[in-house]
Amino acid sequence: MFKVISFYKYVELENPRYWMHKFRWICNELNLLGRVLVAEEGVNGAICGETENIKEFKRKIRDNETFSDLTFREMNSKEQAYHKLAVKVRDEIVAFGENVDLNKTGKHVEPEELKIMLDNKEKIILLDARGEHEHKIGRFKNAVTMPIESFRNFPKTAGILEPYKNEKIVMYCTGGIRCEKSSAFLKQKGFKKVHQLKGGIIDFINKFPNTYFEGSCFVFDDRLTTISETPIAICEHCGNRSDKYINCHNLDCDRLFVCCDECESKNNYCCSIKCKDVGRHRKKIAVVAR
Ligand SMILES: [Zn+2]
Ligand SMILES: [Zn+2]
C-alpha cells in the first residue's frame, strides 16, 4: 500500500540549498518519489511511497525544529503516484508573482467549521482559488470559480471578485498553500471578510466524503485526478461523464483533456482524429526495473 502526502510551510529559510539536499537525502534513503520545492519563503512538497516509509519521512522531517509543526495531507494510493523525484530550489514555493504579507492571510477555517456553515446554509461565498482544468472536473457546489489557467494569473483576474468585497468569503484550493497567498492578496486589496479552508479540498473530502464537494480532485502527480463516484466533467470525444484527464499522446499537441476509458483506447490516447492520424506519438510508458 502506498501513501501520497503533501505538505507546505511558509517559513523563512536562510539556506534553501541546505534544505534541498536534506529533503533529497531523506527521500532517496526511503525510496520516495515526488516533488519538493524549497525557497527562502518555505517548502512545498508532495511525495509518495510505501506507508511505513512515509511514516518514517514524517518523523525525520519533524525532528528538525523548523518543521516540528509540519502537517500533512494524506491520500492512499494503490501504486506509486510519481515516476521520479525532483527536489529543487525556486524563487517561490508556489508561483504567484506578487508580494504579499504572509502574516496577514485569511482566517483559517477548519473542515468541521465549513461543514457547519454549509449545513446551516450560511450566506458565504465559496471561492475556488484553483485553475480552470482543476475546477472543471470537481469543485464545491455553488463555488465561485476563476477563469485562470495558472495561479500566476490570479492577481490580474481578481478584479472580477469586486462584487464580493464585503461578503464573507471562504477560499479553498487543493491543500491550502495557494490560499495563503491569494487570501493575503485579497485582504490587501480591501476585501473585508476573507477566510481560507485549512487543509484544502483534500482534508475536507477525507473527513466529509460525498457531501459538498462534487466531482473529483485534480492532483499534481501521475494520477492527475482522484477517483470520484460522481464525475461532473464530460469526455471530449463521446460526451459521457468522466473525470479522467490525459495528455494527448501526439507529442506536438500534448493537450490535457477529459477522456473516458473507452475513448482513450479507441482514439489511441489522442484528443482528436487529427492527432490520432498524424504527428509523432508518445511511446507507451514502459515499466523499468531499477
Ligand atoms: Zn468517451
Ligand atoms: Zn491532440
Image (cartoon, rainbow, N blue to C red):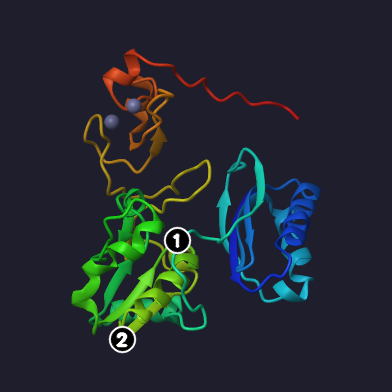
CB-based contact (under 8 Å), mark 2 and mark 1: no
Q: In x, y percent, where is residue 208?
A: 42, 68
User: Observer-nearest residue: 41 or 217?
Assistant: 41
Q: In x, y percent, where is residue 60?
A: 78, 64
Label 1: how many residues lie within 10 Å, few (<14), some (14-19) or many (20+)? many
Q: Which one is in front in this view, the residue at disc 2 or the one at disc 1?
A: 2
Above or below: residue 183 compared with residue 222: below
Q: In x, y percent, where is residue 255?
A: 37, 34
User: Observer-nearest residue: 113 or 253?
Assistant: 253
Above or below: residue 214 compared with residue 220: below
Q: Splitting the image into 4 quarters, where does residue 153 fall?
A: bottom left
Above or below: residue 259 compared with residue 114: above
Q: Splitting the image into 4 quarters, where does residue 265 fall?
A: top left
Q: In x, y percent, where is residue 7?
A: 59, 63
Determine the residue positioned at 34% across, 17% down: 276
Q: Amino acid at mark 2?
A: Lys
Residue 66 visible in image: yes
> Alpha carbon of mark 2 to alpha carbon of mark 1: how far?
23 Å
Q: Splitting the image into 4 quarters, where does residue 98 fall?
A: bottom left
Above or below: residue 154 compared with residue 1: below
Q: Amino acid at mark 1?
A: Thr
Q: Secondary structure at mark 1?
A: loop
Query: Which image quadrant shows ligand 2?
Result: top left
Residue tagged 1: 174
Please indicate whether residue 135 sits to the left or right of residue 91 in the image. Answer: left
- Label 2 CB, ligand 2: below 8 Å? no
Determine the residue positioned at 45% across, 61% down: 174
User: Observer-nearest residue: 130 or 239?
Assistant: 130
The outermost residue toward the top is 277
Residue tagged 2: 192
Please indicate whether residue 217 sits to the left or right of residue 258 in the image. Answer: right
